[in-house]
Image (cartoon, rainbow, N blue to C red):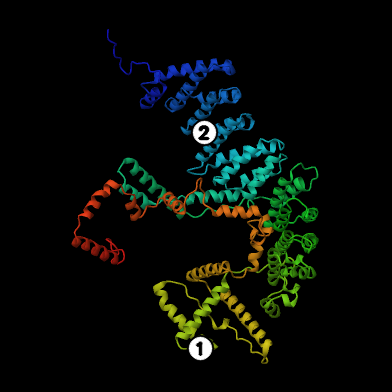
Amino acid sequence: MPKRKVAALEKIDADFASLQQKIHRDPKSYKDDFLKQWEQYESQREIFLVSPSTASSETVESFHNIIDLIAHVAECYKEETESFSSDLGAILTQHHVVLHPELREKIVGSLLILRRKDIIDSTAVLTTLFPILVSSQSKSLRSLLFQKILSDLRNSNTKSINHPLNRTVQTVLYNLITADRTSPRAIWAIKLTREMWKRQFWTDAKPVDVMKEACLSENEKVVIGAVRFFLGGDQEREDVEDESSDEEIDLSKIRHQIGINKKSKKQKKTYKNAVDKVKRAERKKSKPHPLNFSALHLLHDPQDFAEQLFSKHLQNTKSKLSLDTKLLVLQLVTRLVGLHQLTIVSLYSWFIKFLTPRQQSVTSFLASLAQGVHNLVPPDALEPLIQKIANEFVSEAAAAEVAAAGLNSIREICARQPLAMTDTLLQDLVQYRKSKDKGVMMAAKGLLSLYREVGAELLNKRDRGKDATINLKSGIQHQRKFGEEDVGGIEGIELLAKWKEEERKKRRLEKGLPENAGSDEEDALDSDEWEVGSDDSSDSGEWVNVYHSSDEEDEPASKKPRTGEDEDDEEDEEEKKAELERISKLATTTILTPADLAKLQELRMSSSVEKALGGRKRKQAMEDRHRDDGLTAEQIEAPARLRKLTKEERMELVKEGRPERSEHKSTQAIRKSKKEAAGKSTSNREKQRKKNFLMTLGKAKSKQKRSLVETRKVLRGHIDRSSHGGRRKNGT
C-alpha cells in the first residue's frame, strides 16, 4: 500500500528552524504550534531547575533549542512571552556557575536578541549581565559578557547619544569602584570606560570622574589601568579616528574592475555599498569637528587630585606599588602640575633622592621632573635640583650618555623656568659645547641657544651672540621676573603689518613716488585709497581700512648724528620702535576685514613652515612644546644617532635594510614579487616572453616565409612607429 501524502498544515513539524520561518510568515495560523512549544519550554525549565548541574546532554540540547526558538519569535507573541526574559535572567544569575557553556552562551545571546527586538531595554540587559561579569570566575564567560555589554552600549549610542543609559551605566561603574577600593573588580569598569572613550561615545566629564576614583584605588592593576587612561587614552582615540579616516575607497578602480570582469549582481551591490560609504565619509568631513577635550582638561579639581595621588601612592612609605607603577603615577602627577600650573612644593624635594645615575630608570625620573615645572614654580625650589643634577651627571668623569642626559634635563627644566639657573653654573655648563662627544656637545649648545633667547644676561658677553647683544642694548630683550606673563595680543599681527607696509611701498613705486613718504604725501595717498575703496565697495562689498591723520604721530628727530657701531645700534633701535609702533597702530586703529583675516592665516602658515624648515624657535614655542604632549625618557637620553652603536644594533640596522624572504631570490625576482603584490601589471615585453609557445608558432612560420621586400617593409614600419611613439603615438 503506497504512503499517503499529508498536507503542509496538517503535518506536525519538529524542525525548529522551519517552524520559526513559518511563524514569522503567519503568526496567527501557527499560534497553537507555538503554545505547544511554550508549554514544553515551561515543563523543561521546571525539570532543569530541579538539578541544573546534573542535567543530561539530551536535556541540555533540547532546552537550548527551544530557548533559541522562543527568543526569535517572541516579538510575534508578546503577551504569551512576557515572563521569558525574566526567566532567562533568573536562570543565568542563579546558576551561571554550573550551567553548560553552550547553554550559558545561548541564554546570553537570547537576551541580546530580545534587546535588539526592543522587547526589553538596555538597562535590563546590563543590570543582569554586569553583576555576573564582575563576579564570575570563568574566563570565557567574562570575555563573552564583556563583548556583549560593549556591543550593546555601542549600538545604543550609534544613531544618537543615549544620555539616560550612559548616566545609569556610569553611575554603576562609579559605585563599583568606590564600594571596595581593594577589590580587583574595578578593572572591568576601567576596560569598559576606556573602550567607550576610545570610540568617542563618552566624551564628557563623568567617565573622567570614574577613572579619577580608579586612580585612587589600592589595587595595583586598577591603578595601572586608570593611570594609563589619562596618559594615553587621548592618543588611542586619535589612532582610532585616523584608522577610520584612512579607509579610503577608490571608486574609479571599482568601476574599472566592473567594466573588465563579468557582470553580476554582487558587483553592483559592492559598487553601491562603496558609493554609500564614500558619501557618508564626505558628510562626516563636512560636519563641524567635535570639541573632544582631553581627559586631563575635564578634571573637576586637578589640584586636589594631584595632591591625593602624590600623598597616597608616592609620598606614602607604606605604599605597595612597584617601581614601574610609581613611575606611571609620577608621570601623571607631573603632567597635571605642568598642564594646569599647579603648586605642590613637597614634590620637588621628593625628587632629590632619585637624581643619581645609579638609580633605576633615572631618565624617566628626569623627564617627569622636567614636565612638572612651569613658570610659577618658585626658583628656590628648583635650584637645589639643578645643582644636584649638575653635580651627579655633568662632569668630566661621567660617561658621555650620562652627561648628555643631565644637560638635556637641565635644558628642559630651564625652558619652563629660566630663573632657576645661576650665572656661575650656566657659564660652567656652556663650556661643554667643546666636548668631543657629539651628544654632549649638542646638549650644551641647546642650553646655550635657550639662554640666548630667555636670559642672555647670565651668559658671558662672548657667548651671547649678535642678536642677543643687540636686543639687550636696545631693551627689547630682558630677563623676565618671577610670575611675569606676556601681554595678550593677536597672533601673527606683526606679519600682517609688515606685509601691509611692503604692499604700500610697492604701490608708491608703481606710481613713481619714493618708498618713504612725508606726512603730506601719506595724507594724499590715504585720501586716494579711501576714494578708490569707496568706488570698489559698491562692487566687492568688502571692508575698507580707514586711517585718520590725527592718529599718526610725528617721528622724533635724532638729537645728534652718530657714527660707527653706535649709529648702527641707534638705527636698529629706531627700526624696532617703528615696527612696534606700526604693529600697535594696526591692532588698535584698524578693523580687520575678512580678506585681512584670510591673509593673516596664510602668513601664519608660511611662518610656521619656515620655522619647521630650520628657522629659529620662538620663546613661547619652547615653553609650550611639551605642555600638552608630555615629556618622555627618550627625549632626555642622547639620540641613538649621536652615540656609537654596539655590534647588535649595527646588525639590526643591516637586517632592516635586507628584504624579508624565506628563501634566496635574486634582486629582479624580489622586485617582481613586490610589483605583483602591489597589483601592478607586467610590461608588454614580459608578456610576450611568457606567451605560450604554440600561440607563437604561427607567427614564427610566417616570418620564415617572408620575402626580402616584405621583411624590409615590416622593418621600415617598425622604425617609423618607434620614432612616433609606437602604435599609440605616445611620443606625440
Residue at disc 2, secondary structure: loop
| 195 vs 653: above or below | above
Question: Does residue 183 appear to the left or right of 581 in the view shown?
Answer: right
The mark found on residue 102 in the picture is none
| 319 vs 110: above or below | below
The x and y percentages for residue 131 are 62, 31
Provide the residue designation for mark 2.
121
Work out whether residue 419 or residue 533 is closer to the camera in this orientation and state it: 419
The x and y percentages for residue 59 are 51, 17
Query: What residue appears at the point 69 percent right and 63 percent down from the top-left corner?
Result: 439
In the picture, the quarter occupied by the C terminus is: bottom left
- The amino acid type of the residue labelled 1 equals Pro
Question: Cα distance, mark 2 to mark 1?
Answer: 80 Å
Query: What residue appears at the point 25 percent right and 52 percent down from the top-left corner?
Result: 700
Residue 213 in view in this figure: no
Q: Quadrant of residue 473?
A: bottom right
The x and y percentages for residue 482 are 75, 66
Query: What residue appears at the point 60 percent right and 76 percent down from the top-left corner?
Result: 584
In the picture, the quarter occupied by the N terminus is: top left
Residue 689 in view in this figure: yes
The x and y percentages for residue 670 are 46, 51
Sort mark 1 into few (<14), some (14-19) or many (20+) by Cα contacts within 10 Å: few
- The amino acid type of the residue labelled 2 equals Asp
Provide the residue designation for mark 1.
514
Question: Does residue 271 appear to the left or right of 429 in the view shown?
Answer: left
